[in-house]
Image (spheres, grey):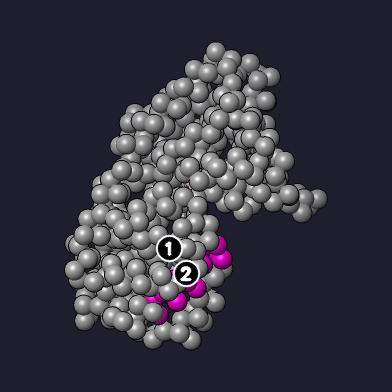
Amino acid sequence: MKIGIVCYPTYGGSGVVATELGKALAKAGHQIHFITYSQPTRLDFFSENLFYHEVNVKSYPLFDYPPYELALASKMVDVVEHEKIDILHVHYAIPHASAAFMAKQILKTKGISIPVITTLHGTDITLVGKDATYEPVVTFSINQSDGVTAVSDDLKKDTKDHFDITNHIEVIPNFIDLERFKKQKKDHFKKAICPNDERLIVHTSNFRKVKRVQDVIEVFNRVRKVLPAKLLLVGDGPERYPMEELCRKLCNHDDVRFLGKLEAVEEVLSVADLFLMTSEKESFGLAALEAMACEVPVVSSNAGGLPELNLDGTSGFVCKVGDVEDMAKKAIHILDEANLGKFKEGALNRAKDFDVSNILPIYVNFYEQIMENVKKGESTIA
Ligand code: GMT
């Protein structure tokens, strides 16, 4: 198949999933055309099946807001027409699903029928999409997609609850490449961070308010009072500075380090004993899955799709959003020598359920089914 993938090229989960999906499809022999405004972060090597088409937005003094969506729709038309694309898969509804709708209509006037699949990732529904500023366009473009997927049951439910959706939504969970995300031997690294065999707790995120990083620090502070531990905070975003301030108030400086954005996050995860994900909203929790794949148990909140990923009592624990006392209690339980091995094993076993080899065929089947429906002129409206 020739597949056009539209996504955000940045570090965010939706861009990572889209890029990893494209890479896995390319490895399986499909030809993948990424359409986005800059080179996707994880697309930094050559493969004969991978192509990247840059969307250039022309500005003009009249435009306070350069019309990215129009440039994107035009680029989709161009790529579909000239590369003979079989199917377009857009990740994150805003503005990709509506741009795809426009491209589809333009292509129709040229006698080309292009099936469009929209994958909903989370904040495109739970935060941004629900806002009245975008809601009518999001509803319309979801209903006009030939196929719609959501990354968890919870996100599907949320979408159905908050938008007037007439289309079927297929749940296809996110996935992980266990060949890349696996525990590596990094003893020297562990020794440098934890010279006295302290337990190592890790959090990675984009440091937005929705991640409740303050809860990570509160939990760590409680754990630290009971046992020797260090905290590594990976990533960057608007909340980083306030969180540094909070750490100065609450924690010993030597115990907490902010590492900023890291390309090879699996190296840090390889030496971690526990991962904290305290989010207010989280449709799936890809960062937690990456941790589990590296044999790191997870204490998470119960937001969104997290309970579908993190099996309470097996791969870690699930606590109420904001309940830092319970999170700290559960973290201390996991970090106990008598329990840690069992939880590490539980985390890895759970991650195996989401190995790319299990999820890729689901996407391929879905593509084939949608292409078949469009060919027969059937809609997927439930
Ligand atoms: O987590 C973020 O804020 C980034 C966001 C994105 O759209 O890139 O992540 C969302 O999509 C990821 C991939 O499907 C999911 O793993 C994240 O749970 C989801 N984030 C939220 O729902 C807050």
Residue 203, quarter of the rendered image:
bottom left
Count the numbered circles shown: 2
Q: Main secondary structure of the magenta part?
A: helix
Q: Is residue 80 above or below residue 175?
A: above
Q: Which residue matches tag 2?
A: 323
What whole-number distance in Å separates the C-alpha atoms at marks 2 and 1?
Answer: 7 Å
* Residue 244 appears in the picture as rendered: yes
Q: Is residue 354 above or below residue 3?
A: below
Residue 148 location (% of width, % of height):
54, 33
Q: Nearer the viewer, residue 227 or 264?
A: 227
Cβ atoms at labels 2 and 1 below 8 Å apart: yes
Q: Amino acid at mark 1?
A: Cys
Q: Looking at the rendering, in which quadrant would you find the N terminus?
A: top left
Q: Is residue 193 above or below residue 95?
A: below
Does the segment drawn in magenta span residue 213? yes
Residue 201, quarter of the rendered image:
bottom left
Please rate how many residues cluster around mark 1, counting C-alpha atoms within 10 Å: few if below 14, some from 14 to 19, many from 20: many
Q: Which residue matches tag 1?
A: 319
Residue 254, quarter of the rendered image:
bottom left
- In the rendered image, the residue lying farthest to the top is 376
Q: Residue at x 51, y 82 (%)?
A: 245
Is 295 displayed left or right of 301 in the figure? left
The magenta stretch spans which residues?
Answer: 204-221
Q: Residue at x 31, y 66 (%)?
A: 274
Residue 297 location (% of width, % of height):
30, 60
Does the segment drawn in magenta span residue 75? no
